[in-house]
Image (tube, rainbow, N blue to C red):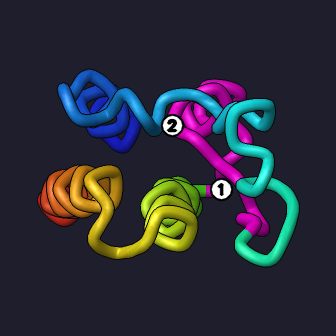
């Protein structure tokens, strides 16, 4: 199930930067300014929404999970370590999701 795949991704050793919302005190430009992320999302928020039944289906969950990776690349740049981590987690999540 999508929840199982999300849980597996969240337990991955590279997932820690994506588990919680970005701290606006440490990174105010994440939320404000020319490089601000328009739709912030993180894996714990996705898990909470999934558990609350807020998603219409797997496609909606995938769209939010994709948003985590896209936001990371937008804010940090394609070559940043966090973006490389996002790329790996995205690949793993999509592979699992495609096996459904």
- Looking at the image, residue 78 lies above or below residue 68: below
| Disc 2 crowd, CA 10 A, few/some/many (<14, 14-19, 20+) | many
| Disc 1 crowd, CA 10 A, few/some/many (<14, 14-19, 20+) | few
Residue 82 picture location, percent across and down: 33, 51
Single out the mark in the foreground, 2 or 1: 2
**Does the magenta segment cover residue 9?**
no
Which residue is rendered at x = 23% and y = 35% of the image? 14
**Does the magenta segment cover residue 52?**
yes
Residue bearing the label numbered 1: 56
Quarter placement of the C terminus:
bottom left
Which residue is rendered at x = 37% and y = 27% of the image? 16
Q: Which residues are magenta?
A: 36-56
Residue bearing the label numbered 2: 43
Describe residue 25's horizontal placement relative to residue 97 as left or right.
Answer: right
- The image's mark for residue 67 is none
Asked which quadrant contains residue 45, the reply is top right
Is there any visible trace of residue 51 in the rendered image? Answer: yes
Query: Total label count?
Result: 2
Residue 20 picture location, percent across and down: 58, 28
Which residue is rendered at x = 42% and y = 35% of the image? 17
Asked which quadrant contains residue 21, the reply is top right
Quarter placement of the N terminus:
top left
Q: Decide: marks 2, 1 in contact (CB < 8 A)?
A: no
**Alpha carbon separation for disc pair 2 and 1:** 17 Å
Residue 25 picture location, percent across and down: 79, 31
> Of callouts 2 and 1, which one flags the residue occurring earlier in the amino acid sequence?
2
Circle 1: element type: loop
- Looking at the image, residue 34 lies above or below residue 91: below
Circle 2: element type: helix
Is there any visible trace of residue 97 in the rendered image? Answer: no
Which residue is rendered at x = 65% and y = 48% of the image? 41
């Amino acid at each position: 199930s999508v929840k199982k795949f999300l849980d597996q991704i969240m337990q991955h050793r590279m997932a820690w930067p994506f588990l919680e919302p970005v701290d606006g005190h440490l990174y105010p430009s994440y939320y404000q300014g020319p490089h601000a992320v328009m739709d912030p999302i993180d894996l714990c928020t996705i898990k909470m929404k999934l558990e609350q039944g807020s998603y219409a289906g797997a496609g909606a969950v995938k769209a939010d999970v994709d948003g985590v990776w896209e936001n990371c690349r937008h804010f940090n740049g394609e070559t940043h370590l966090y973006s490389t981590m996002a790329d790996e987690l995205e690949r793993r999540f999509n592979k699992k999701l495609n096996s459904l």
